[in-house]
């Protein structure tokens, strides 16, 4: 027998599916479709709003989402996967709301080397970005994806994994003709604006099996208000796939399938060869190549010229004719004087 909580969850998800077209739906019609009272619809609407979903209500017209949304769907994502990927990872899990997809995958590790798992969510209450930052993704606006992978042992040049993931994401986007660049160490860039990012977490020893969690955040169609919030009132710093591809933008499920495909393929190569097969491509995609940059590492600030990456993924910066290596830090373009 289903619990009251699972029944309510199923009704919330069905209600969202009915509202996903962005059109008005009367409370009476919604009540008939869900076979509950109009008061029950009102309560469900309230619970969705508490999750952070903006649902508009207009007298004599009903309820609607501000825009149409293609909801994440596990079955559609599976259908978008290549057969080899389906055989390699567990069926993707999709949640309406979760604390963190990375945490979920980390708490349910895969034990078999060479296998993986995937988790997506419409909303995260504690999504994490790099250096402990909060990753914000308004409902229906992007992809919050975490991929878990079990390595038989820590692969060579593991420190460069986030760079290889970036190459894999670019490969996935190129399937839809979206041309983007990479910014060390883990940002996706379009016209010098942030399109997405990567967060890597690993559990294991220096030798022996290691479980890695790859968190990917990708902006698909960001509302104007969210752009302002994310960019600190500078909306020009944010980009999304819709802006790049316009009407050719694929569904989020198609994009999620392509991302999982490309990352899994990369992981199979990376497990034995490390960063070497990906370094030339990364250098071609480098958004900072030969540009004046500022690197903040702890309390130190370094000004120089970006000269790509080393074979272990370290950032190379030329300072007064000498190359300096950075394995961590915040790097940004330095305005020309």
Image: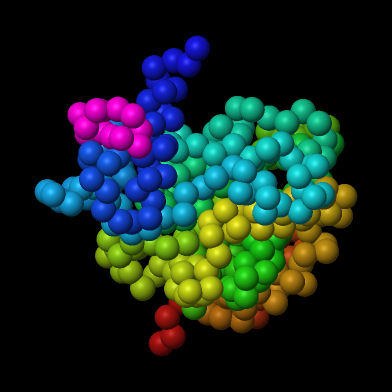
Q: Nearer the viewer, residue 327 or 122?
A: 122
Residue 277 falls in image quadrant: bottom right
Q: Is residue 165 above or below residue 333?
A: above
- The x, y position of residue 198, in whole percent, is 57, 53
Residue 308 falls in image quadrant: bottom right
- The x, y position of residue 166, in whole percent, is 65, 61
Outermost residue to the left: 59
Q: Is residue 39 left or right of residue 143?
A: left
Residue 250 visible (yes or no): yes
Outermost residue to the bottom: 337
- The x, y position of residue 170, in whole percent, is 65, 66
Verify whether residue 181 appears in magenta: no
Residue 188 falls in image quadrant: bottom right
Residue placed at 30% from the left, 27% from the top?
A: 36
Q: Quadrant of the C terminus?
A: bottom left
Residue 301 visible (yes or no): no
Q: Main secondary structure of the magenta part?
A: helix
Q: Is residue 281 left or right of residue 201?
A: right
Q: Is residue 151 left or right of residue 39?
A: right
Q: Nearer the viewer, residue 184 or 18?
A: 18
Residue placed at 62% from the left, 67% from the top?
A: 173
Outermost residue to the right: 272
Verify whether residue 35 appears in magenta: yes
Q: Is residue 116 left or right of residue 197?
A: right
- The x, y position of residue 129, in whole percent, is 48, 48
Residue placed at 31% from the left, 69% from the top?
A: 234
Residue numbers of the magenta segment? 31-42
């Amino acid at each position: 027998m289903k619990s009251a909580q699972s029944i309510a969850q199923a009704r919330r998800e069905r209600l969202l599916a009915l509202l996903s077209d962005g059109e008005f739906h009367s409370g009476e019609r919604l009540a008939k479709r869900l076979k509950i009272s109009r008061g029950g619809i009102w309560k469900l609407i309230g619970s969705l709003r508490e999750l952070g979903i903006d649902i508009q209500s207009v007298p004599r017209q009903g309820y609607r989402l501000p825009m149409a949304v293609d909801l994440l769907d596990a079955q559609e994502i599976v259908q978008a996967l290549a057969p080899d990927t389906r055989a390699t990872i567990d069926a993707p899990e999709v949640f309406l709301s979760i604390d963190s997809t990375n945490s979920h995958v980390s708490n349910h590790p895969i034990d078999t080397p060479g296998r993986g798992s995937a988790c997506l969510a419409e909303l995260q209450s504690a999504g994490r970005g790099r250096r402990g930052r909060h990753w914000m993704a308004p409902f229906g606006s992007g992809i919050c994806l975490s991929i878990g992978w079990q390595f038989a042992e820590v692969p060579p040049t593991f420190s460069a994994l986030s760079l290889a993931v970036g190459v894999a994401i670019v490969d996935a986007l190129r399937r839809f003709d979206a041309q983007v660049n990479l910014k060390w160490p883990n940002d996706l860039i379009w016209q010098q604006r942030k399109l997405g990012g990567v967060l890597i977490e690993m559990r294991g020893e220096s030798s022996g099996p290691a479980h890695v969690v790859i968190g990917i955040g990708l902006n698909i169609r960001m509302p104007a208000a969210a752009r302002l919030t994310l960019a600190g009132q500078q909306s020009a710093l944010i980009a999304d796939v819709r802006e790049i591809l316009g009407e050719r933008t694929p569904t989020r499920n198609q994009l999620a399938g392509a991302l999982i495909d490309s990352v899994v393929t990369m992981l199979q190569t990376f497990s034995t060869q490390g960063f070497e097969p990906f370094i030339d491509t990364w250098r071609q995609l480098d958004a900072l190549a030969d540009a004046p940059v500022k690197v903040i590492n702890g309390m130190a600030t370094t000004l120089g010229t970006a000269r790509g990456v080393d074979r272990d993924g370290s950032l190379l910066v030329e300072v007064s004719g000498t190359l300096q290596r950075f394995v961590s830090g915040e790097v940004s373009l330095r305005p020309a004087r």
